[in-house]
Image (spheres, rainbow, N blue to C red):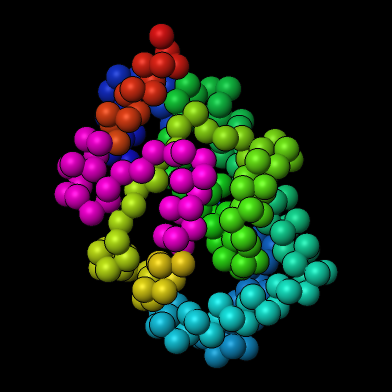
Amino acid sequence: KLLFSSLEKRFNKVLYVWCRWEPFLFKPLIKLWKRRQGKQNKKENEDDYKILKSKKTTLLKNPIFRWSWFLIFVTEYGLQVFFKIRLKKFKKRIIISDRYFYDSFVDQVINFNLSEEKILKLLDNFWIRKVFPEPDLVIYIDCPEEIAIKRKEDVFSLDYLKDRRKIYLKIVDLKGYCKVDGALQIEEVRKNIEEIVNEKLSEILQ
């Protein structure tokens, strides 16, 4: 939101959106499944995460459930992106999306245990790109898991962060996206992000 505040002072039409997938159709099923696994609260330790990850991976090996999950993810999240971003592109000149497709995509990569080849194939898939348009600029804020876990109140597993960081770094490398050191002080992180954004805006608006 610091970036939004900075750009809002310079441009009339700037919008900030939180765009992580919110699973409405699967939400009751996910809650029921977690309850049956004995996970009744939000707190999760290392053992909880490893057990749930293993069971979820096993469950998604079933072709019917696997494709049903993926199709609902694409359809449901695609609609959320349409209303949160696509529609607003007609009114807003600059849209800053916190999270967006890549964040939820990483979750699915872990769920389905996808290889590097399949990750790249899916990212470049025609229909995926139609539903989730590639932004003009993607910035990944990278942070060591030991630091990140101290900053996040909703994550209690280092393995959870390690799994996701590994995939994020792989995607950044495969696609050539920008990476910012998130271990720095917040003011330095903000400055580095603004420099990247300003350079990109200069290219687009010239």
Residue 168 in the image: above or below residue 187 = below
Q: Quadrant of residue 199?
A: top left
Give x and y (percent) for residue 156: 36, 76
Image coordinates of residue 197 in percent, x first then y, are: 35, 28
Which residue is most to the top?
206
- In the picture, the quarter occupied by the C terminus is top left
Query: Main structural element of the magenta stretch: helix, strand or loop?
Result: helix
Residue 67 appears in which quarter of the rendering?
bottom right
Look at the image and tell me whether residue 131 can be seen: no
Instruction: Please tell me whether residue 188 belongs to the stretch shown in magenta.
Output: yes
Looking at the picture, how far across and down is residue 195, in whole percent?
27, 29
- Dividing the picture into quadrants, the one containing residue 73 is bottom right
Name the residue at the front extreme.
Answer: 117
Q: Is residue 185 above or below residue 6?
A: below
In terms of depth relative to the viewer, which is nearer, 196 or 98?
196
Q: Note whether residue 160 is visible.
A: yes
Residue 158 coordinates in the image, percent (x, y)? 36, 73
Q: Residue at x 56, y 47 (%)?
A: 101
Identify the residue at the far right of this view: 64
Please tell me which residue is depicted at 45% across the width and 32% down the height of the picture.
137
Q: Is residue 126 left or right of residue 24?
A: right
> Which span is picked out in magenta?
164-192
Q: Residue at x 63, y 77 (%)?
A: 56
Q: Which of 202 and 151 is in front in this view?
A: 202
Judge from the rendering whether residue 131 lies leftward or rightward of residue 94; answer left or right: right
At 54% from the left and 85% from the top, the residue drawn is 51
Q: Is residue 55 magenta?
A: no
